[in-house]
Image (spheres, helix red, strand yellow):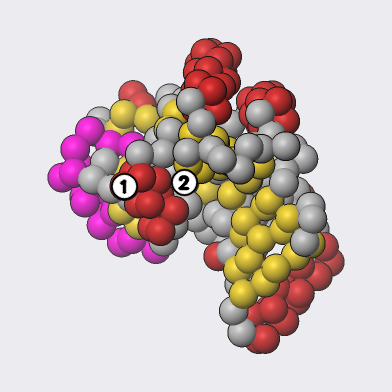
Amino acid sequence: MLEREADGWSALYFDGSTHGSPLTLGGMICGWPKATYPSSAAEESSILEHVRDTVGEKRASGNIVAAIVIEPTQQSTGYVASDSFLSGLRSIANDFEAALIIDETSTGCGASGKGFWQSTESADYVAFGKRTQAVGFYSKTAGVSLGGSENSVKLFSTISKGITQDQLLTQVSQVGEKIAIGTEGASSLPGITDARSSGTSLWVHTDSAATTVKLVAHMRSLGVLVKQNGSNCVVAKPALVLGQP
């Protein structure tokens, strides 16, 4: 069991995380440990080694890392953590008696096309919100805890049934494959440095803030709902009902 006389408790999170202002800002203020989110499969092994070393060092010094928190797809960049990477985090969390928290706030409710949740890894907590309408978390010990109004919970139930009845997970997966193909070679376009997708969500990274503003204006003029994400990124997160032309 964890030592109660530990000097402090913290959570390890990943650079660029968007777990909500209180947690992310709190982590920065308190000096909580932080790791680099993997941008490619080649980086995952070294990052897992860094996470293990960091959690072990903190524990040895009496500053217990009580939880590891990660988004399956990082919403600020569009980078996707592989199943093997999440499994590696699960192993590290088990070894050091930390909780693994999967933040599905932006990836849940079928957004990735991989399932109602994007991650299949066994997590101690799963946080959700946004598309689900109701906000809350699932935990192994306490079950589901929901926030919001009664109407939000009813919407959550209705949306869940609609996803199943209309086979929207299959639709998101199929349309997402087309979008992924369309992003290939996008970095060769003028002003575009990178493009990546997860399900039907799309992140287009630009070479400057000016290019970002112009791209947002251009896409909106064509009827495409996008938003600026920081100074050098444009994001599109269409509804699950988005279909193929």
Q: Is residue 49 above or below residue 73?
A: above
Q: Does residue 222 show up magenta in the picture?
A: yes
**Among the two numbered marks 1 and 2 on one chain, the one whose residue lies closer to the N terminus:** 1
Q: Residue at x 30, y 33 (%)?
A: 192
> Which residue range is magenta in the image?
202-224
Q: Is residue 180 visible?
A: no
139 vs 178, left or right, is right
Can you give x and y, in whole percent of width and height, for residue 103 in the image?
59, 49
Name the residue at the right extreme. 165
| Callout 2: SS | loop
Q: Is residue 163 above or below residue 13?
A: below
Q: Amino acid at mark 1?
A: Ile
Q: Residue at x 25, y 57 (%)?
A: 217
Can you give x and y, in whole percent of width and height, for residue 172 in the image?
67, 50
Q: Between marks 1 and 2, how big is the CA–CA gap?
A: 22 Å
Location of residue 189 (image quadrant)? top left
Q: Residue at x 51, y 43 (%)?
A: 9
Q: Assess whether mark 2 and mark 1 are in contact (beta carbons under 8 angstroms).
A: no
| Callout 1: SS | helix
Q: Is residue 86 above or below residue 229?
A: above
Q: Does residue 141 show up magenta in the picture?
A: no
Residue 29: assigned label:
1
Q: Amino acid at mark 2?
A: Gln
Can you give x and y, in whole percent of width and height, for residue 70 in the image?
55, 40
Residue 75: assigned label:
2
Q: Residue at x 61, y 43 (%)?
A: 4
Q: Nearer the viewer, residue 173 or 36?
A: 36
